[in-house]
Amino acid sequence: TLFFIMAAIISGKLVKLGASQNAKGGTELLAERLLKGTKKELLKNTNIIFNRPDLYENYMAGSKNIFYFHDLPSDRMYKNFFESKMVNRFSHFVFNSDYQKEEFCNKFDFKERSTSVIKNSIIPIEIKQKNYQGVVNLIYHTTPHRGLELLAHCFPKIAADNDKVHLKVFSSLKIYGWDEKDKVFEPLYKKLRDMKNVKYFSNLSNKEIRAELINSHIFAYPNIWPETSCLAAIEAMSAKNLVVLPNLAALKETAGKSKFLYKFTDNVSDHINTFQKQLALAIQFVQKQSEDYNSHLNELKNYADMNHNLNEYLKKWEQVLSYK
């Protein structure tokens, strides 16, 4: 994997080891929510490992250990993990989507192991009516390697066809504290800064992104990076944004309600063409302001808020933590 999130909850404290100690991504957000919302006594003498268990081996003896997967089984760290003694130190395995569980179970044998699916959660975003003043606001608010280049390729054509479409991009690897790796994307950021109707920003806090989502209309996400879940899409739907994205990996599960979910292809020029067509349709859908549009926004919001609700998430975690 290109990006390791090396976080763990060790006896009720968030511990980050390895290269990502300054990371503030989705995994860290979930870890903080889990810590904040769970009864302290349930976390006592319990370790929740998100990734790279080898780094936390010293903490494991004499504790209950839970593995909380946030990646895919193709990740190189699993190459020998399920044949090692280390795997037997875990009494429970938690997946963050049905898709992820299926992928792991197809590749490794979980028949004798205790497992749960606890879907990634958000705090629902408070919004009544989506405001529209004649300009359609697009947003991209995740890391650059997930498809930002495709969006940058499409947007000038979209803007040439329709001057009333604006794009805001909040994206960099600085969110993981990886300023060095971010330099690779500097030409892409420059291209975006120079583009008409585009405002490019480095990453903002989750609180600031949530405020931006209230004012945007479409989460434009030509994703090329297989995900196990997508908090960015869930929060976008909760803030009543249309979501335009492919059915790659867990996106089919996360954003299956979207009218603008399209078939993923590995062929980059085909992907760009399909995405651009879907995005143009979504823009027209916003501009028409039909009853159908408003009911679709409500459907997306209800789905995100009900299926990815923080209270449900914490309840399920309490059950797992209460297992003896």
Image: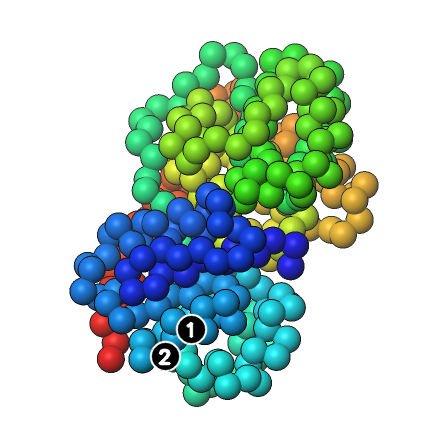
Mark 2, secondary structure of its residue: loop
Residue 90 vs 11, above or below: the answer is below
- Residue 263 visible in the snapshot: no
Mark 1, secondary structure of its residue: helix
Q: Amino acid at mark 2?
A: Ala
- Residue 183 visible in the snapshot: yes
Residue 130 vs 74, above or below: the answer is above
Residue nearer the viewer, 137 or 63: 63
The residue beneath circle 1 is: 58
Q: Quadrant of the N terminus?
A: bottom right
Residue 126 vs 316, above or below: the answer is above
How far, Cα to Cα, is label 2 from label 1? 7 Å
Residue 283, x across and y down, in percent: 59, 25
Residue 26, x across and y down, in percent: 46, 47
Residue drawn at the location 74% of the way across and 51% of the way down:
265
The residue beneath circle 2 is: 61
Pointer 2 with pointer 1, Cβ within 8 A? yes
Q: Amino acid at mark 1?
A: Asn
